[in-house]
Image (cartoon, helix red, strand yellow):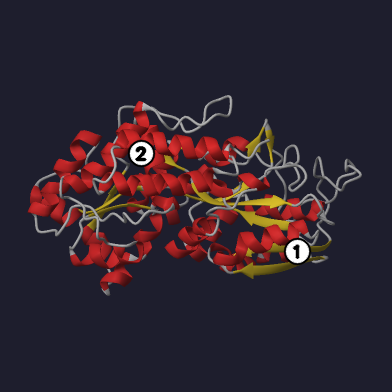
Amino acid sequence: MSNLSRRGALRLTTGIALSCILSLAGCGRSDDTAATGTVKTIDASPATGTINVWAAQGDADVLDKVIAPFKAANPDLTVKLTLIPNAEYYTKLQSAIAAGKGPDVAQLFPESQAQFLDPSILQPVPDGLVDPGAFFKSLWEAGMVKGVAYTVPWYAYTYALVYRSDLAEKAGVKAPATWEEMVPFLKALQGAGAGHGLGADIGWDIFNGQDVAMYAWQAGGSLLSSDGTWTLDTPAMVEALKFNASFFTSGVADTSGPTFLDAQPYFVAGKTASMITGPWVVGQLDTAAKKTGWTASHVATAPLPAGPSGSVSFSAGGSWGVLAGSGNASASWKLIHYISQPGTQVAQYKAYSSLPAVVSAWDDPAIKGQPLLDAFLTQLKNTRTFPQVSTWQQVATRLGKEMEAVAKGKQTAEKAAASVQAYAESLGTGTG
């Protein structure tokens, strides 16, 4: 499972503003089609014609293989798949849309797709195409604006605690369940031989800002009010900034590293003993250790320690949408329907380790038999989506910068929260 594909997909967005049960063969164009080409419902005839699909390199690298049964069942359909480097994907997609030359189907990212959720850019998901309740709740909600769904979730991920089980056993400690237990747990891992209890990348960027946002939720805060105003200068945000800083002021984490790319080698070498990270590491640590079976004997996972308002994380992953200007929306939605089925998402997992956005797919033995994924499943059931406004990426980046200043003792948490609030208010939400 590629961590770079996920972090890269997030990084490229920084600063950008802007159930019907169907057969394997899919379904055909409905007569209920508006003059614009928008499909309101889908029927059961075969998909025909040509559709152009754009996706970012990474999870979509195996898509052609995964959808091979769909193409075989719809022989009169041609699917043209274009894979674009992560660092260029959203830029190219936005340029193509602006020029009226966008694809029929585009991959998006639930955590950073807000600028696309507009009827002038994406078509609403047809009635009955999928069961919204089949997906992790926050992933589905990430594609909705004013009660209208524009995207269908594809794969999912979130953060959980990944730690050295061998060192925890040596220290005689269990995974922390609360904020209060976190630093003592990490100190115990250090006492068992780790250089630092936690590997945390303090170099400010959007990801660190998202981490603090997650902690603010755990402290009972929100990021955006129900009336669309920023709520960042709050006691919960102050507590979040202080909680994050406590890792560094207590000595269980080091402000000098590891960086993101160093995280796994540090962890394997014992320079650090835990990470707050995504599920991709589960499939990569044996490679980092250069030893098959190392992960099974050295690693455990747990849901995030709960703050005053619980163990809340964020939802992220991949999603699909059909562009408003698609010339073959009917076939496009059929393909998305196929990709959204539990069996297809299991096939995607087997091909690339992309974790399903459909909850029932986690019951497949291929996934259920992976105990280190259990914590991620638990956490995915308790996630929120980041604000679906076009300026969130800029606000999150500023939050990361302020987080670093607090962790290094250069700024108080109170002043940092006030600074982020003022910055966010100066940007607005990009909604008019």
Identified at 66% across, 45% down, the residue is 151
Q: Quadrant of the N terminus?
A: bottom left
Against 277, is 268 above or below? below
Work out whether residue 26 or residue 18 is closer to the camera in this orientation and state it: 18
Q: Name the kind of residue labelled 1 in the image.
A: Asn
Figure quadrant of the C terminus: top right
Residue 237 in view in this figure: yes
Residue 346 position in % (x across, y down)? 53, 55
Label 1 CA crowd tier, 10 Å (few <14, some 14–19, many 20+): some
Instruction: Determine whether, in the image, residue 252 is placed left or right of residue 362.
Output: left
Identify the disc placed on residue 416. 2
| Residue 104 can be seen, yes or no | no
For mark 2, give the secondary structure. helix
**Residue flagged by tag 2: what amino acid is it?**
Ala
Q: How far across and how far down the image is residue 76, in percent?
A: 83, 65
Give the answer, above or below, for where 146 lies relative to 356.
Answer: above
Residue denoted by label 1 = 52
Determine the secondary structure under disc 1. Answer: strand
Residue positioned 42% across, 36% down in the render: 382
- Specify the quadrant of the image occupied by residue 41: top right
